[in-house]
Image: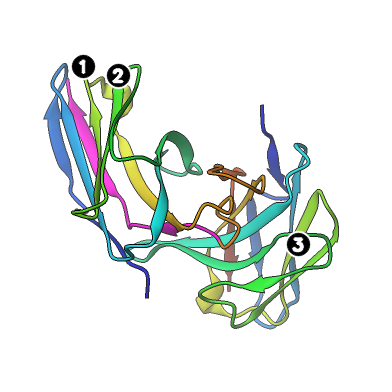
């Protein structure tokens, strides 16, 4: 089975802090994604990566950056956390080629106070 | 702007009946279509995917795709209380493994009444 893990289930940070969210997948997937999910707004793509050291902006990249130094690990960075970044953050991964599926990690609920 | 539309619900269905969930999408170039189930406080779980026009069945679930009308639906037969969840429709442009991410609808909240 595909396994995607995220470093924390719940996280509380203060405004202005630098926040790191880590995601690891164990299925040798090329593609990795970061989404945020908010009530009424649904799931929105922040960033994705299709290879090591490669990154592409999604629909809402402002205020975020990412890092992918190893194939299995994809990090989301909030350079200076703000209250409007309080959300559920979901990492996903998929293979490349053909009609393939994305598999999600358990999510990190981040609260910025 | 790619858009995926779903009725937010709640959709209430008696136990044992057929639940019908619908989704429309705006981009005619979309090629891959997915249904995810999400329980409250949990992450989305893939339950069905479909690429070709017509029906695809997997156990109690049937996905239906009509590219000409730009809609995809999910039927759940013999609905159980454990099917109560939010169902997310997701679409990707092209067949490149969804490497550019999925566009999600906001989900339909399904309630199965015992």
* A45 in magenta: no
For the residues beneath circles 2 and 1, the answer to whether they share a chain is yes
Point out the stretch of residues depicted in magenta: B101-114
| Rendered view: A43 above or below A24 | below
Label 3 in the same subunit as label 2: no
Q: Position of residue B35 (x, y in %)?
A: 38, 41
Q: Are marks 2 and 1 in contact (CB under 8 Å)?
A: yes
Q: Which residue is mark 2?
A: B60
Helix, strand, or loop for circle 3?
A: strand
Tell me residue B53's x, y (percent).
29, 40
Q: Is residue B92 left or right of residue B17?
A: right
Magenta run includes residue B102: yes
Q: Mark 2 and mark 1: span between their CA atoms?
A: 7 Å
Label 3 chain ID:
A
Label located before the other in sequence (2 or 1): 2
Of all chains, the one bearing label 2 is: B
Which label sits in the foreground, 3 or 2? 2
Horizontally, residue B89 falls left or right of residue B102, namely: left
Point out the image quarter for the N terminus of chain B.
bottom left
Picture residue at 81% right of the left edge, 48% below the top: A72
**Circle 2: element type:** loop
Q: Where on the picture, by quarter, is residue B30?
A: bottom left
Q: Is residue A84 above or below residue B46?
A: below
Q: Hey, which quadrant is residue B13 in on the image? A: top left
User: Which residue is disc 1 drawn over?
Assistant: B78
């Amino acid at each position: 089975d595909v396994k995607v893990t995220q470093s924390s289930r719940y996280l509380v940070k203060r405004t202005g802090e630098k926040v790191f969210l880590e995601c690891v997948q164990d299925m040798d997937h090329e593609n990795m994604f970061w989404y945020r999910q908010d009530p009424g707004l649904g799931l929105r793509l922040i960033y994705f990566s299709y290879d090591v050291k490669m990154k592409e902006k999604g629909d809402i990249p402002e205020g975020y950056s990412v890092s992918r130094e190893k194939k299995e690990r994809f990090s989301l960075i909030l350079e200076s956390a703000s209250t409007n970044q309080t959300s559920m953050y979901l990492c996903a991964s998929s293979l490349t080629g053909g009609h393939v599926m994305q598999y999600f990690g358990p999510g990190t609920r981040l609260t910025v106070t | 702007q790619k858009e995926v539309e779903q009725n937010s619900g709640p959709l209430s269905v008696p136990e044992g009946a057929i639940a019908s969930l619908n989704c429309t999408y705006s981009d005619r170039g979309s090629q891959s279509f997915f249904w995810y189930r999400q329980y409250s406080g949990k992450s989305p779980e893939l339950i069905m995917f479909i690429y070709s026009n017509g029906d695809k069945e997997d156990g109690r679930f049937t996905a239906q795709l009509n590219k000409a009308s730009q809609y995809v639906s999910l039927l759940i037969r013999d609905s159980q209380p454990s099917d109560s969840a939010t169902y997310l429709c997701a679409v990707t442009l092209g067949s490149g493994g969804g490497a550019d991410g999925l566009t999600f609808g906001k989900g339909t909240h399904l309630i199965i009444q015992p």
